[in-house]
Structures are given as C-alpha cells and as structure tokens.
Image: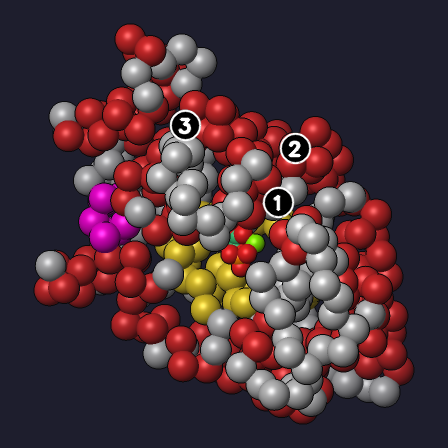
Amino acid sequence: RQEVYRELRKKPSVTKDGVQVDLLMNAGLAVDLPQLAEAGAAGIGLFRTELQFMVASTFPRAEAQEKLYRDVLDAARGKPVTFRTIDIGGDKVLPYFKGSIQEENPALGWRAIRLTLDRPGLLRTQIRALLKACGGRELKLMLPMVTELGEIARAREIIDREVRHLSRFAHHLPTSLKLGAMLEVPSLLFQLDELMQAVDFVSVGSNDLFQFVMAVDRGNTQLSDRFDTLSTPFLRVLKQIADAGVRNHTPVTLCGELAGKPISAMALIGLGYRSISMSPASIGPVKAMLTELPLDELKAFFDDNLMAPAQGLPMRALLHAFADDR
Ligand code: PEP
Ligand code: MG
C-alpha cells in the first residue's frame, strides 16, 4: 500500500474524469513539515498556530513565533500555507494563561477569536509576527470559531493597523494578504452569502461544525458512534456551504477530520469541494480514491439521493454502495 501511495504522489490530483481536487495537509509544529513532501500534499490547508503555545511553558515570544512561521513557509517552498490565528480555550487550555477562566460549557465559551479579540495584544503580536515572516510572500490567514461577521471586521481592523505600522517602518510586507473565516458555528449558515462576501475564503471546520449542528460533544466517547457525519442533514449543510462559495466566487475548503477518510472525502468532492485538508497520513488513501472516482456519476447520485435517499436508506450506506459498485 505504502508503495502504491508513493507512486500516486507523482500522479496529478484529479478525478477519473479529470477534475482537479487539491489535497492539502494539516500541521501545527515544525516536526510536521517534512510530511509535506513525504505525503505529497499540495500545501498546508490548516496550520494550527496554537500548538506552539500549547507545548510551551510561557507565551512564545514574538521572535519565536516569527521564526516558526518563516520556517513553515520555507519548508512549503511556494506551496500555499493557511495559518489559523490562535485557537485556544475550549479543550485547549494554556496552564500559564492567567486570564483563563473556569467555564460550565468550555466548548461554547471564551475561546478562539472570542478570546483573542478580548486580548488584542495576543492577536497583534501574532499578526505582526506573521506579517514579518511572510514578507515578500503571500499570507493566508484564517480566524477560528467565527460567530458573527462583526468579529471578522474587528480582526481586519487589527490586521490593517499592523500593516500600517510595519509599512511605516519600511518592513518588507506580504505580497498579498488573504483573510478567511472558519465555518464552525451554525449561525454562519444563515448568512452564507454575507459571509462569502466578507472574506477571501472560507474553511469549514467540520469537527466543530458537526459538534454544534448535532449538539454532540466532539470528545464524548459515549456518543462518538451515535450520530453520523455522513447523515443526510449534515451532508445538506455541507452542500449549502459549497454552493454558496460557487455563487459568490469565494473559495471554500474543508479542514476537519471528515476530509481524511476516503468515503467522506468522496462525499465532499461529490458535493462540490475542490480543496480539502487532512492529516498527512490520509493523503495517500484519499488520493487513491480520488483518481478512481467518476465524479459525473457521483454528482448524479447526489442529485437523485440528497433530497430523497433511495429506499429511505442512510446516506452512508448509499455512499458505500456507490463506491463498491465502481
Ligand atoms: C475543526 O473544528 O474541524 C478544526 C479543523 O479545528 P480544530 O479541530 O482544531 O478545532
Ligand atoms: Mg475547530
């Protein structure tokens, strides 16, 4: 199998009928970087910057942040990298963060963009480090756990201020800056067009989105097999997001665990996703699926089944039957 995957690395990342799908990888530390070449990823679709904070015993200094970001871009050798601003809070606690609080429902609490907008010093330092590290290159930046569009506007103000500050001191700035939002909170599903207009790209965080759409704690093993990520309602949600991206000419990617399993990656591609990001070990198996996938047939399958699944069967079963018949 490993041999097969290694051979596949040289092949174009296209379906059997020739449609290109970018397979990117998720990363978070310098040790992940060699995987980029080994797995044959098209880039880094999610760089979890909070990991550097989580393995440290105090807040990483601005210089250390900048160095990591620079190392990531150097290792990527021109392949795209999407950095996510610090996603702490919830289940990701920093023991040395004195401002952290005890919460009844941490997943719904003071986390991610909510926290960093309240502690703008943290965000400013990180953004400055990113802008410097990306001097002369493209910076793709995304915000985790966006709930309201106002949060994007506030983050953008902080970014613009840092850009102005650095240009005043004649720093080498990024050649372009793309700002995206993660779609993890269902409130955004009811303002998809406005969201798509407010950003340069959207990245679906399916781990959190599934947790909030189904009201099921993503870490609760008692419930982990109970609700299906390939259930009809969740697939319809994912399709609405992909459609809104096309309608607004806004690129949409997905970077949760869903992208890493061949059967669910197949479903995503059928629903319209052309860029998905996963753990490096998943790229081989997903690419093996991709190159054998007759996308036209899968689209027809969804046209027939998404609004009315055949014989009332679960979509997962129907998708497996589709895959087995090919
Ligand atoms: C997600 O929620 O799907 C995601 C990619 O972010 P994380 O798993 O880091 O919360
Ligand atoms: Mg998340």
- Dot 3 or dot 1, earlier in sequence: 1
In the image shown, does 101 or 324 lie closer to the viewer? 101
Q: Residues within 10 Å of mark 3 (few under 14, many from 20)?
A: some
Q: Which residue is mark 2?
A: 189
Name the amino acid type tagged 2: Leu
In the image shown, does 269 or 186 lie closer to the viewer? 186
Marks 1/2 in contact by CB < 8 Å: the verdict is yes
Q: Reply above or below: 273 against 50.
A: above
- Dot 2 or dot 3, earlier in sequence: 2
In the image shown, does 43 or 92 lie closer to the viewer? 92
Name the quadrant of the C terminus.
top left
Task: Point out which mark residue 231 bears.
Answer: 3
Marks 2/3 in contact by CB < 8 Å: the verdict is no
Residue 177 seen in the current view: yes
Prevailing SS of the magenta stretch? helix
Task: Point out which mark residue 183 bears.
Answer: 1
As helix, strand or loop, the secondary structure at mark 3 comes to loop
Q: Residues within 10 Å of mark 1 (few under 14, many from 20)?
A: many
Name the amino acid type tagged 1: Leu
Q: Which residues are magenta?
A: 285-291
